[in-house]
Amino acid sequence: MTDQGQTRAQQLLGDTAPELVRLTDEVLFGEVWADPGLSPRDRSLVTVAAVTALHRPEQLKSRLRLALANGVSKDELVTAITHLAFYAGWPNAMSAITQLKAIIEE
C-alpha cells in the first residue's frame, strides 16, 4: 500500500481497469508472490531476468528496486544481467544495467 492507502496498481490504473487491478493485487501480489516455493529474493531475481529479457523498461525500474529490497545485491544483479546479455540480447542487458546504475546512484 502507498501513503494514500492505494496499491500501486490502483494508483496507475484507477477505475480504468478494475479487474486488472484486482488480479494484480489479489492474484499476482497476493497469491503468486506469497507462494513459499520461492523466496521473495529468488522470485525477484527471476522477475528481473524475465522483465530484462522481454525488454519491459516500464516495469524494470520497480522490479530492480524490489529485488534490492528483497536482498538481491547490486553485484548479483549486474552478474545476472551480464549473463542475460548472451541469451536475451545485448541491448536489453545494456538498458537494464543503465537503469540499475541510475537506481544505485540515487
Image (tube, rainbow, N blue to C red):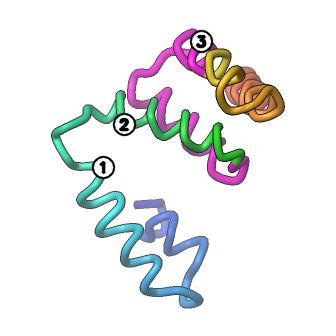
Numbered badge on residue 33: 1
Q: Amino acid at mark 1?
A: Trp
How dense is the environment of label 2, judged by Cα within 10 Å: few (below 14), some, or many (20 and up)? some
Q: Which residue is mark 3?
A: 79
- The answer to if 45 sits in the magenta stretch is no
Judged by its main secondary structure, the magenta piece is helix
Specify which label sits upstream in the sequence, 1 or 3: 1
Q: Position of residue 41 (x, y in %)?
A: 36, 28
Residue 49: quadrant of the picture: top right
Q: Quadrant of the C terminus?
A: top right
Q: Amino acid at mark 3?
A: Thr
- The answer to if 73 sits in the magenta stretch is yes
Q: Are marks 2 and 1 in contact (CB under 8 Å)?
A: yes
Q: Which residues are magenta?
A: 56-80
Specify which label sits upstream in the sequence, 2 or 1: 1
| Along the line of sight, the residue nearer the viewer: 66 or 82 | 82
Residue appearing at x 58%, y 78% in the figure: 13
Is residue 20 visible in the rendered image? The answer is: yes
Position of residue 65 relative to residue 79, above or below, is below
Give the label, 1 or 3, closer to the camera: 3
